[in-house]
Amino acid sequence: MRRDNEDTTCRTVSGRSGNGHVSGIAYCDLAHLLESDLNDPAVTRRAWDTLHLVTTVQGIVNRSGANLYIRLMPEPDDFWWNYLRDEHGWFSGRDVTRIDSIETLLTHFADALKGVVVYREKPWVGSNLASTIAGVEDRVALRYDECPGSVYQRVLNHGEAFTRNRLDLFDADDTPIWRKDDTQPFEPSGSDKRDAYLWLKRRYLDTGLVSKQYMGYYIDAYWLTNPAENSLPNCTLTNHDFFISQRAFFMDLHVWEEETPVDEPDQPLGSDLKTLRELLRAMHDHAEGGIIHIGGFTPWAWKYSSYPGAGSAHGGVDTEWKMVKEVSSYNALIDADALSLAGMSNASFYQHFPLEDHYPQNPRPKRHDFEKAGLIDRGGRVADKTYILLYIGDYDSAAWFNLMVPGLWTDPARGTIPCNWAFNPNLDQRAPHVMHYVRTHQSPNDWFITGDNGAGYLNPSMLTAPRPEPDMPDGWAQWVEHNEAYYDRYDLTITGFLIEGHSPGLTDEGFDAYMRFSPDGLVCHRQCDPTGLHRGAMPYVRHTQDVGGTPQEAAEKIVAELDNTRTQFLFFRHVIQTPTWQAEMMDLVKRNDPGDRVRFVDPYTFFGLLKLHEQQRQAFVAGPALRLGKGVNQPAET
C-alpha cells in the first residue's frame, strides 16, 4: 500500500454515521503503484495482484456502506475525497483510519471476508472468474504466485484463519476446475474460455446467485502480456469494485464470428461470440427482461481490434458498434469505460452517496426570449440564420465522467459560453457524487442533455421484435420505463445523440418511444432526414459532423458547412474538449462570419427554433388552404 518512507499519518475526527453508530472509513493510498515499471514482469504482477486483492476487498466491504476508500489516481481521487469530506460534508464526521499494508487491510476487514479464490494467470479467463466468485461468495481474489514476497505468499503467511476457506480454480496438476466439476460431465468445446464461462454460468448465473441488473465486461489477465501499452489504471481492475459489490457476472469475449481472438487463436471459429450470446440470453431471462447494465468496453489496445497486436481485421469503432449491437439485442446497455480514460476507483464507495429526488435545469427559454434576442419576429417566423448546437461528450462512461469533471468544472471559460453537457443520467449508478456536483454547481450557461443513446448506450432499434432470438419479446416498454425515471429525476427532455452503429435506424415505433421521454428534441447520427418534426411535435436533427484537433482545425470544419443562402440547423460533436477549447473555436468561427449569421445556442433554443421552423416549413408545403386555419405555432397536419 505504501512505500516504507511514506508518511502514514492521517487526520482522524470522531463522529457518527447516519444510523447513529460510531463509524469509520478505511483509507488506502495506492498511488505509488503508478510508479511501477510496467516493463518489469515481477513489478507489474505485484501491482496487478495488489489491485485485484484490494478491489475485491473493497467491493465486499462497501456493499453495506461507504467503508473503504482507495487513492490510486491522485487528481480525481483527491478532488472527490476533499469535496465529499469538506464542501459537501457527506462523511466529514467519520473517523478515518490509514491502511498501510495488505496485512492491515485483511485484519481490519476480517469479519467481512469469507476466504480466498485462487486463480492461475493462464488461462487468462481465470481472473474474471475470480472477480465473479469474489462478489458472490465474499472471497478475496488471488493470483497464484510461488515467488517469495508475492502478494499470494504474503496472504498465505498472514494466517490460516483467513485462508482455510479456500477455493482453487485448478488442482495440483493444473487441471482447471471447470474440467473436473463433478456436478456435470465435462464435454470439452475446444475453448478454455468457453468451457470456463459456461461452468461459471451453470454455477452462478443459472442458479440465480449473481446480480439481475449488472455485468462486467473487463479485460482479463491477458493484460499482463503487454501492460506497458497504457497506464496502470487502464488495466481496469479497480473498476471491478462496484460490480463485485453488486455480485455481478464478469466476462471478456470477442464479438466477430469470422475471427478467432488473439488470446485464444486455436479455439473453434465463433466460439467467443456463441458464448457471449449464451451468457446474455441467460442474463436476460434472469433479469426477467429488464434493462441490464454492463460496465466496461472493448479492450481494443490488447484484443479484438486492428490495433497492432490486438488480432482483428476490424477497427476499434467497428468492434465497439458490433459489441453494442450484440448486447442491445438482450436489453443490455454499455457503461463504456473506454481507453485511455478507462480507470475508476471507489464506485462501490460512491454508490452510497445521497442523491436528491430531483435536479432542475436552468429556466428554459420561452418565445419572448427568442423575440427579445431577435431570433423570431412577432409573427413567429424564425430569423434567417445558422443555429449551431455544440455537443460536449462523450460521457457514456462513469470512468470518463469521474475523471474529467474536476478539470471541466474548474475551467475558466465555463459559464461564459453556452455549454451543452452530454452526461448520460445512468452514470449515477457508479458516479452519483459527480452527477450531484455538476447539477448543484451549474452556471446559467450550463445545459444538460443526454449522450448516446439516452439513459445508457444501447442501440434501441435492436429492441424491436422479431429479434435475433425469435422467442425473445420486444424490449421497448422496458427501455421507455428505464429512461422515463432518469429523465424525470434530472429534468431532461432532449436526447443529445443517438448512435445507430451497425443497427438499423429508428422506425416510427422508435421515434414514438423517444417522444415519450425526449419530447423537446433528438439528434440522430446518420439514419434520418437532416431535420424533421415527428408527428408534428418532436423536433429532430441529423448529426452534421464531429470536430476535434486544434480550435483552428475545428473552426475550419464548421465554417465549411455554412450556407448563407438558407436557414440552417447544424449539430457538431466534440469529445473530451474543454470549455476554453470550445470558446476559442467559437471565436474563430465568428471571425469567419462577416454577415453575423452564426448563433451558438443552448439545446432548448436550438430545438425550440427548429420546431418553429419545421412547423412553418410543413405548413408552407401543405399549401395556403391549410395554412389559413393554422397558427404559426401549431403543428401542420399530415
Image: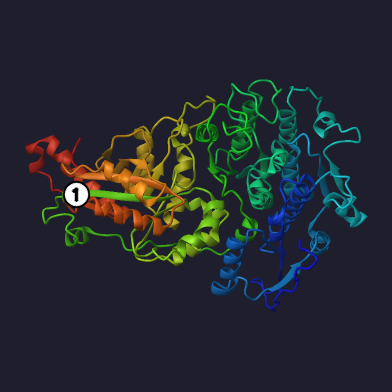
Count of number-bearing discs: 1
> Quadrant location of the C terminus?
top left
Which quadrant of the view contains residue 354? bottom right
Asked if 472 appears above or below 9 in the picture, the reply is: above
> Quadrant location of the N terminus?
bottom right
In the figure, is residue 250 to the left or right of 389?
Answer: right
Is residue 115 in sight in this rendering? no
Q: Percent position (x, y) of residue 624? A: 7, 38
In the figure, is residue 112 to the left or right of 352?
Answer: right
Asked if 270 appears above or below 53 in the picture, the reply is: above
How is the structure coloured here?
rainbow
Q: Percent position (x, y) of residue 57? A: 75, 55
The residue singled out by tag 1 in the image is: 385
In the figure, is residue 511 to the left or right of 257?
Answer: left
Q: Which residue is drawn at 35% across and 40% down?
A: 545
Residue toward you, 486 or 295: 295
Residue toward you, 359 or 123: 123
Residue toward you, 550 or 317: 550
Is residue 436 in sight in this rendering? yes
Which three-letter amino acid code belongs to the residue tagged 1?
Lys
Q: Percent position (x, y) of residue 441? A: 44, 67
Q: Residue at x 46, y 60 (%)?
A: 408
Q: What element carries label 1?
A: loop
In the figure, is residue 511 to the left or right of 294?
Answer: left
Q: Residue at x 25, y 54 (%)?
A: 591
